[in-house]
Image: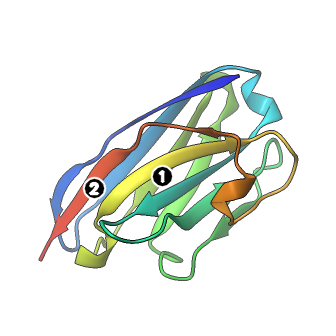
Amino acid sequence: QVLLVESGGGLVQAGGSLRLSCTASGRTFRSVAMAWFRQAPGKERDFVAAITRSVGSTSYADSVKGRFTITRDNAKNAVYLQMNSLKPEDTAVYYCAAKTIPGMATNPGRYDYWGQGTQVTVSS
């Protein structure tokens, strides 16, 4: 079992930055691959970024490449999403997710554990 808790969301103007944090407890953090997804009202949950367990390889959705950075700190059982140059279309609830099978995945159905979500609102 893995418990995930997100923080760091809020309201920011277009062009601004936010850093989301996700803290994990339970199963050894090093054993899970981590990812961020987001869901806007009336839309499906979309992949944002993922990072592997130990090597730290990353993957990004095309819409956030060059603006968002995912990192993890295994000593702190945490994963982060640095979001720069934010746009109004980035507005969504952002979810942290963990999967126990090795490798990255963009399909939310491949993830075993989810946080409660944190709201990010970007004003124009």
- Scheme by which the image is coloured: rainbow
Q: What element carries label 1?
A: strand
* Residue occupying image coordinates x 28% and y 66%: 91
Crowding near pointer 2: few (<14 within 10 Å), some, many (20+)?
A: many
Crowding near pointer 1: few (<14 within 10 Å), some, many (20+)?
A: many
Q: Which of 114 and 124 is in front in this view?
A: 114
Question: What amino acid does circle 2 point to?
Answer: Val
Which quadrant of the structure image shows residue 99?
top right
Is 71 on the left or on the right of 7, as rendered? right
Which residue in the structure is indicated by mark 1? 81
Is 19 on the left or on the right of 123, as rendered? right
Across and down, in percent, residue 11 comes to 16, 55
Across and down, in percent, residue 59 comes to 68, 67
Front position among marks 1 and 2: 2
Hey, which residue is sitting farthest right in the picture? 102
Across and down, in percent, residue 109 comes to 69, 56
Is 86 on the left or on the right of 111, as rendered? left
Which quadrant of the structure image shows residue 86?
bottom left
Q: Nearer the viewer, residue 50 or 44?
A: 44
Which residue in the structure is indicated by mark 2? 120
Which quadrant of the structure image shows residue 39?
bottom left
Q: Which of 99 and 122 is in front in this view?
A: 99
Query: The C terminus lies in which quarter of the figure?
Result: bottom left
Query: The N terminus lies in which quarter of the figure?
Result: top right
Compare marks 1 and 2 and give the one earlier in the sequence.
Answer: 1
Is 102 on the left or on the right of 80, as rendered? right
* Residue occupying image coordinates x 37% and y 49%: 19
Q: Is mark 2 on a helix, strand or loop?
A: strand
* Residue occupying image coordinates x 47% and y 48%: 95
Q: Distance between the residues labelled 1 and 2?
A: 12 Å
